[in-house]
Image (cartoon, rainbow, N blue to C red):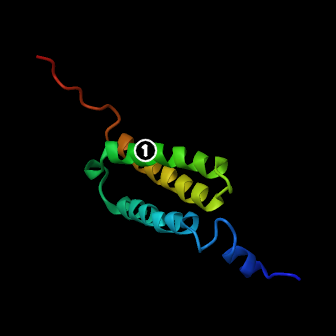
């Protein structure tokens, strides 16, 4: 008995009946927010926030490939989060290439 591609997807271990599908689906909101930040001037962007997005994006991209079952949707959304954070960090660096150093004393 042959099952359709849609039925196999729905019933898969990373399909829409599981959190493995819905968590990365909702995380696309972070990517959309990051793309929306492209219209914000670079001086108003946070280095810490975008650094955390980039680093966590890389960490969770790796996670998408090592968990069982492999979850390519988790990897894709987190790689997109990484790219969004990296683009914003590049914009910040180009705006202010040398961070201001705090005076001692």
Q: Position of residue 35 (x, y in %)?
A: 42, 62
- Given residues 59 and 54, the one toward you in this image is 59
Residue at image mark 1: 90
In this view, the residue farthest toward the right is 1
Identify the residue at horizontal 89%, vertical 83% (top origin): 1
Q: Position of residue 84 (x, y in %)?
A: 46, 54
Residue 51 vertical position relative to residue 32 in the rendered view, above or below: above
In this view, the residue farthest toward the top is 105
Identify the residue at horizontal 65%, vertical 59% (top origin): 72
Q: Horizontally, is 104 left or right of 16 in the view?
A: left
Identify the residue at horizontal 43%, vertical 44% (top origin): 90
Identify the residue at horizontal 23%, vertical 26% (top origin): 101
Secondary structure at numbered mark 1: helix
In this view, the residue farthest toward the front is 1
User: Image quadrant for the C terminus?
Assistant: top left
- Given residues 11 and 28, the one toward you in this image is 11
């Amino acid at each position: 008995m042959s099952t359709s591609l849609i039925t196999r997807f729905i019933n898969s271990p990373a399909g829409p009946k599981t959190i493995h599908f819905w968590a990365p689906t909702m995380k696309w909101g972070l990517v959309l927010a990051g793309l929306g930040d492209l219209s914000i001037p670079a001086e108003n962007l946070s280095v810490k926030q975008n650094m955390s997005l980039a680093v966590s994006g890389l960490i969770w991209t790796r996670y998408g490939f090592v968990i069982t079952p492999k979850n390519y949707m988790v990897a894709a959304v987190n790689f997109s989060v990484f790219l969004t954070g990296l683009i914003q960090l590049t914009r910040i660096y180009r705006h202010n290439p040398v961070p201001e150093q705090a005076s001692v004393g």
